[in-house]
Structure formats: C-alpha cells, structure tokens
C-alpha cells in the first residue's frame, strides 16, 4: 500500500522532436533515483506510441494505463512494480484514446494524488507540441527539455522552450543527450551554444552510448545494464535532483 507524507515533484520529460532519446533519459533518471530508494512513479504519456516500458526494462510486466486510474477503474496502488526496483511504479499510455479525448481535469487530479504518494513523478511526454504535450504541461511543476546536438533538434527544443515560457512555465532545464565530443568539434558547436540557442539553463549532458540500445534489447534499464557512460550521467542527475528536493523540502529525510 502506498502512503507516507510525500509532497513530491512532477517532472515532464519533453523534447521538440523524436529521436532525441527523451524516453531513455526519463527511464534512466527514474531508475537512478530508485537506486536511492526514492518512491518513483513513471507515466508514459505518449498516447498511441508508448515505449517507456522497454526503456524501463518492464516490457514483460503487465501494466495498467494511466486512464485506468484517472477514470476511477483502479487506484495508484495498482501501478506496475519494477522487477529490480521495488520503489519504482509504472503506468503505460492508452492505445485507444486520442490525447484530445482525455479528461484533463481527471488527469490533473490523478497527478495531485500521486504527489502525495511518491517523491518523484516522471511524465514521458510525446515529442512535439501537440495535444499530448499540452495535456502534460498543464499539470507539471518542472520540465527537463531533452535535445540532441544536431541543429534540427536544437531548433525544435528552442521552440518548446519558448512555448513553455509563454505559458508561464519557468522551471525548465536542458539535457543535451547523445553527445559525441568529436562530432561537436567537427561542427564547431559547444554546449554553451546549445544553451544560448534554446535559452534554457543546463541540467546536464549525456554522452552517446551504445549501452542505451543494448540495454533495451536485453530488457534491462541502463543503470542496471552498465554503470558507466550514459548510466553515470543518469546517476549524477539523480544526485542533483535529490539535492534540490532536499533543499526545497527540508522536513523530508
């Protein structure tokens, strides 16, 4: 049974385009915090194109969709439990409902309840800025904006950053994913350039790592499959977020 006196944070993991590795970042960060025994809820919000379960290493675990809870058929306690991390729970995205048809108020009520039961709630948002993105962003405290180092990904990330600012969202941090230092030097691009273009403070950098693909193929999350390279970045992000969480919630242990 879930419980406790949590007042958790809701993080939306967003990106301007597909292929940035947003879902892998969401899964890696969630597992890194679960290693610290934080209570984590991951929700796949990419309606119709769900694959967060693969990145989490939960493709063989039966999971309810978040609609099953938001519409009252099940409870938060019924979320799928991770086979490796007992404090990590998961809801998948529905396959038979368009984002426009989802009751936004019911979705928000579910997230309010989740904040009382979990330390961190991670929403894997669909790429882009359509209805699924708007559903997620309406109820989110903080955003991790994931981009690759390519010019198209950076331009699209800048658009997402601008839209979030226009809607009054200020707690946005940038993660530059799949960074190959040799490639950056070839195109004379620096991480500072990416920050300047998107207008977003940096949370961190994740290097290009074949273990991301291999971990998904073997059904194991990155921090379990390999403890270095990209996994090391996720573990460091976990430390950073935990630090801010303790600072902003000093009554927590």
Image (cartoon, rainbow, N blue to C red):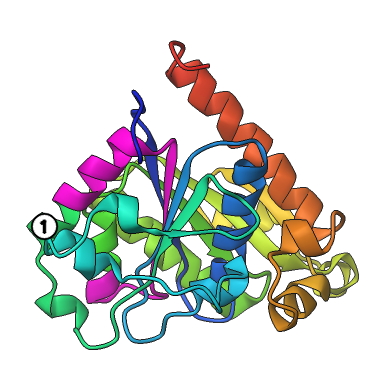
Name of the residue lying farthest toward the front: 1
Magenta segment: does it hold 19?
A: no
Indicate left or right for 73 with 250 as reference: left
Indicate left or right for 237 with 133 as reference: right
Q: Nearer the viewer, residue 218 or 234?
A: 218
Name the residue at 40% across, 40% down.
171
x, y percent for residue 244? 54, 26
- Where is 60 relative to 125, above or below? below
Magenta segment: does it hold 116?
A: yes
Q: Nearer the viewer, residue 147 or 100?
A: 100
Name the residue at 20% across, 77% down.
99
Name the quarter where the N terminus is drawn: top left
**Which of the 4 image quarters holds residue 226?**
bottom right
Q: Residues within 10 Å of mark 1 (few under 14, many from 20)?
A: some
x, y percent for residue 75? 23, 54
At mark 1, the secondary structure is helix
Name the residue at 33% across, 32% down.
3
Q: Which of 241 and 129 is in front in this view?
A: 241
Name the residue at 48% across, 46% down.
40
Residue that carries the numbered disc 1 in the rendered image: 106
């Amino acid at each position: 049974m879930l419980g406790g006196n949590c007042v958790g944070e809701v993080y939306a993991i967003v990106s301007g385009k597909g292929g940035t590795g947003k879902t892998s970042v969401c899964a890696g960060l969630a597992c890194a915090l679960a290693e610290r025994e934080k209570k984590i809820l991951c929700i796949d919000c990419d309606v119709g194109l769900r694959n967060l379960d693969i990145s989490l290493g939960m493709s063989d675990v039966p999971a309810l969709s978040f609609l099953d809870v938001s519409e009252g058929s099940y409870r938060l306690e019924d979320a799928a439990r991770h086979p490796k991390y007992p404090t990590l729970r998961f809801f998948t995205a529905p396959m038979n409902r368009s984002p426009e048809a989802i009751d936004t108020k019911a979705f928000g009520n579910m997230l309010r309840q989740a904040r009382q039961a979990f330390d961190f709630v991670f929403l894997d948002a669909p790429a882009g800025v359509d209805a699924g993105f708007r559903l997620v962003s309406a109820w989110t405290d903080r955003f991790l904006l994931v981009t690759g180092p390519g010019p198209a990904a950076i331009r699209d990330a800048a658009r997402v950053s601008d839209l979030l600012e226009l809607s009054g969202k200020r707690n946005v941090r940038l993660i530059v994913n799949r960074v190959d230092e040799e490639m950056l030097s070839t195109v004379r691009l620096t991480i500072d350039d990416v920050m300047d273009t998107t207008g977003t403070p940096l949370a961190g950098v994740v290097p290009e790592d074949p273990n991301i693909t291999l971990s998904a193929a073997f059904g194991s999350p990155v921090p379990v499959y390999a403890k270095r390279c990209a996994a090391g970045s996720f573990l460091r992000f976990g430390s950073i977020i935990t630090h801010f969480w303790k600072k902003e919630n000093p009554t927590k242990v």
